[in-house]
Image (cartoon, grey):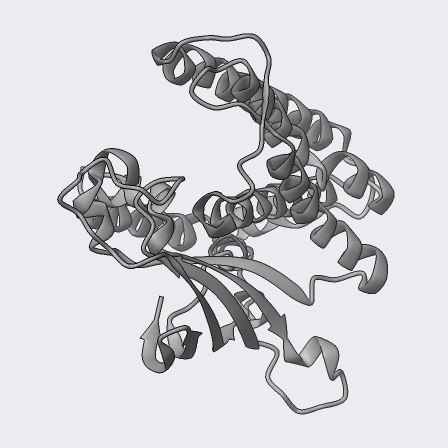
Amino acid sequence: MSFRLGILIVFLISFTTISFSQSKINQFLTPSDTLNKPRRNGVIIAEVSLASMALIGLNELWYSDYERSKFHVINDNSAWQQLDKFGHAFTSYQLGKHGAQVLRWSGVRKKDQLIYGATLGFTFLTAVEILDGFSQEWGFSWGDVLANAAGSGLYIGQELLWNEQRIALKYSFHQTQYAQLEPEKLGGSLIEQTLKDYNGQTYWLSFNLKSFFKKSKLPEWLNVAFGYGAEGMLSESYISDNQSVKLESPYRQYYLSLDVNLNGIKTNSRVLGTVFDIFDMIKIPLPTVEFSKKGTAFHLFYN
């Protein structure tokens, strides 16, 4: 199934749902004012089941292809110009955000949302890290655990300080030439590259201006984002197995850009609100200034 076809199917399903059962879905998606035990129990069962299946699947389908070992710790903090650590923080933040939100939807009190929901990303990713520790190919990384904690902490800290998310951790991706040089390590397909080609990944801290300047007339959807990326990486050690490939040393990239806070777009549809909330993890391509050792560059639409 092609990527475009998948998007089309999602659109058609969403359109059909919105058209024929808008009121019922809006009612279902509305957070409960009080504890709704059936919802809460359903959320707990679903999360435990999905997490268990994911871990079992990883252990049987992924790690089984590599030699097992005694539990060991590695130091990979210098790999990939730390972009893999940003990836851990991003994943932990997003899982924690949605973990807390589904508990809010169930009417669970705020304290328990943060304790049991916002820590979902850290808990799950730490379990994956333990599996890494028993694999000869990888190893348990305290740097990864710290990044997981940073992602969860970003969400929890803002809820405790402001009772809202003023700073969102987002992601964007563009294809690069490096994946063609090392498809085994950086991905052969577009889907693989979005996960494995760190040269094309950018991680953003997106600041909602209206939330910091409450009395201003700024639109609630307007954000300013600061991004981080890097290029020139063909492996964790930056050395290619292909001896014919000669590239300059990897270098870091920093970005300043405008962004859209999809959650700031007003809508009476709970369906659209949910869709906006999910896709708000993606940085919208907008005018961007790039800073690196190569100088300053302007991109009309950077992703």
Residue 123 at x, y = what percent?
A: 67, 30
In the image, residue 112 sits, relative to residue 213, either above or below, namely: above
Which residue ends up furthest to the left in the rendered image? 244
| Total numbered labels placed on residues in the image | 0
Answer with left or right where residue 247 lies relative to residue 33.
Answer: left
What's the residue at 31%, 42% (across, down)? 239
Q: Residue at x 85, y 43 (%)?
A: 109
Asked whether the viewer can see residue 8, the reply is yes
The answer to whether residue 49 of the structure is visible from this angle is: no
Q: Position of residue 252 (x, y in %)?
A: 44, 63
Which of the image's four quarters has the C terminus? bottom left
Give 246 or 216, whichever is nearer the viewer: 246
Foreground residue, 15 or 53?
Answer: 53
The image shows residue 152 at horizontal and vertical percentages of 69, 45
Q: Residue sitting at 73 percent across and 78 percent down?
A: 212
Residue closest to the far bottom: 217
Instruction: Locate the N terminus and report the quarter of the image it occupies.
Output: top left
Image quadrant of residue 147?
top right
Q: Is residue 143 left or right of residue 8?
A: right
**205 in relation to 56, above or below:** below
Q: Nearer the viewer, residue 294 or 23?
A: 294
